């Protein structure tokens, strides 16, 4: 801690309403929400950018931990411990590096970096979407079934179902 004190004021009702919308929007898109929350906290609620990013990261850590624990308890997470360990180490190192850089980089450059990163992610998503096979290339929906999970019996396809007289 460097002893820097920040003071700001915000509208709690507006913040709650916006957070509800951002949470819904993020769940519909299947994203974490931090990419929406930081600009909202910074520009609509007038929080300092460093406070907005720290608050968002804190919430994402709690939510990610809850998701991982839920998958472990339910039994969906049976392999991938090595990947989890490597990603966790990356998060810890990245957090420390981000905290170090945030003291040396102005808030407007942080926002520019976030915008650039989001633009690159958007281009990647667009590229992946354009390279996906179409329904006509996959076949009818009734013939397409995801592969069974390990330990589960294969689910019969609709085309394999017996015909009743």
Image (cartoon, helix red, strand yellow):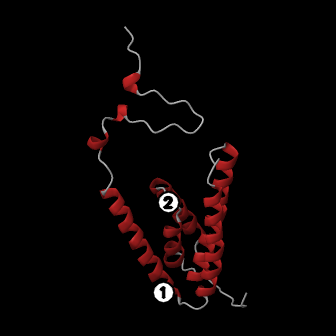
Q: Are marks 2 and 1 in contact (CB under 8 Å)?
A: no
Quarter assignment of residue 138: top left
| Residue receiving disc 2 | 31
Depth order, front residue of 49/16: 49
Looking at the image, the residue that sits furthest to the top is: 165
Check the picture and name the quadrant holding the N terminus. bottom right
In the rendered structure, which disc, 2 or 1, sits on the residue that comes first in sequence?
2
Asked which secondary structure carries label 1, the reply is helix
Q: Is residue 84 above or below residue 54?
A: above
Q: Quadrant of the C terminus?
A: top left
Q: What residue does disc 1 label?
A: 108
Residue that appears at 64% across and 59% down: 82
- Residue beneath the point at 71% across and 91% down: 2
Question: Vertically, is 12 above or below 27?
Answer: below
Which residue is depicted at the point 41% across and 78% down? 116
The answer to which image quadrant residue 162 occupies is: top left
* Mark seen at residue 9: none
| Percent of width and height locating residue 120 | 39, 72
Q: Nearer the viewer, mark 2 or mark 1?
A: 2
Label 1 crowd bin: few (<14), some (14–19), many (20+), radius 10 Å: few
Q: Residue at x 69, y 53 (%)?
A: 69
**Left-right relation of 158 to 152:** left
User: Where residue 10 sits in the image (x, y, percent)?
Assistant: 59, 76
Q: Position of residue 129 (x, y in %)?
A: 34, 57
Q: Secondary structure at mark 2?
A: loop
């Amino acid at each position: 801690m460097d002893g820097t004190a920040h003071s700001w004021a915000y509208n709690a009702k507006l913040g709650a309403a916006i957070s509800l919308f951002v949470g819904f929007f993020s769940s519909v898109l299947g994203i974490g929400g931090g990419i929406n929350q930081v600009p909202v906290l910074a520009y609509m609620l007038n929080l300092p950018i460093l406070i907005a990013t720290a608050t968002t990261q804190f919430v994402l850590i709690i939510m990610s931990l809850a998701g991982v624990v839920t998958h472990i308890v339910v039994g969906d997470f049976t392999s991938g411990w090595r990947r989890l360990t490597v990603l966790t180490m990356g998060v810890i190192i990245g957090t420390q590096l981000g905290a170090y850089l945030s003291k040396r980089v102005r808030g407007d450059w942080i926002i520019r970096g976030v915008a650039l990163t989001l633009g690159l992610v958007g281009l990647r998503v667009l590229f992946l979407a354009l390279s996906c096979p179409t329904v006509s290339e996959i076949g009818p929906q009734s013939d397409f079934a995801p592969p069974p999970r390990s330990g589960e019996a294969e689910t019969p396809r609709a085309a394999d179902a017996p015909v009743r007289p």
